[in-house]
Image (cartoon, rainbow, N blue to C red):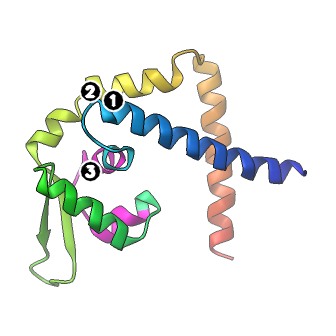
Amino acid sequence: MSEEEMILRMFRSIYASLMSRMNEFCSTYQLTGVQCLIMLELQEDEVTISELAQRMMMKPSNVSGVVKRMEKRGLVQRRRSTQDERIVYVSLQQEALNTISDEMKTRLVDSLFHDVTREQITEILHAVILLDTCIRRCEHE
């Protein structure tokens, strides 16, 4: 197996492990891993379903379904654009903002990186940025 193929295999493994860990961690808050990730994406500002889907690397229809379930729980609010009713904006409700507290984010980060040094985190970040750049370059070819 080539090194490039090993990188792809590792990404699948990392993704599966990360989602498993996210689901385990977020179940404490009665949330799925995807719901937690959506809340993290929405903590700064309101976004459209399409933009959220792009950030989450999911299909808009899948994101819409998850958001609908979150709305029923009072975690998010959807609103249609006044200029184009096909566009739906999503934002966090106060309950969700309370749930996604600094404590929750700190606990999540600590659980993932508890035995990693600052130097290793910097190395990981640089490698992931490089890989992201390579992948995005391929998208435009």
Disc 1 to disc 2: CB gap under 8 Å: yes
Q: Residue at x 90, y 51 (%)?
A: 2
State which region is magenta.
37-54
Q: Residue at x 36, y 67 (%)?
A: 62
Q: Residue at x 20, y 72 (%)?
A: 88
Q: Which mark is residue 10?
A: none
Answer whether residue 4 is magenta in the image: no
Give how far across and how far down residue 137 sits, in percent: 66, 66
Whether residue 46 is visible:
no
Q: Secondary structure at mark 1?
A: helix
Question: How many numbered callouts?
Answer: 3
Residue topped by disc 3: 42
Give how far across and how far down residue 113 sits, in percent: 52, 23
Examine the residues drawn in magenta and state their main secondary structure: helix
The answer to which image quadrant residue 40 occupies is top left
Residue type, numbered disc 3: Leu
Residue type, numbered disc 2: Asp
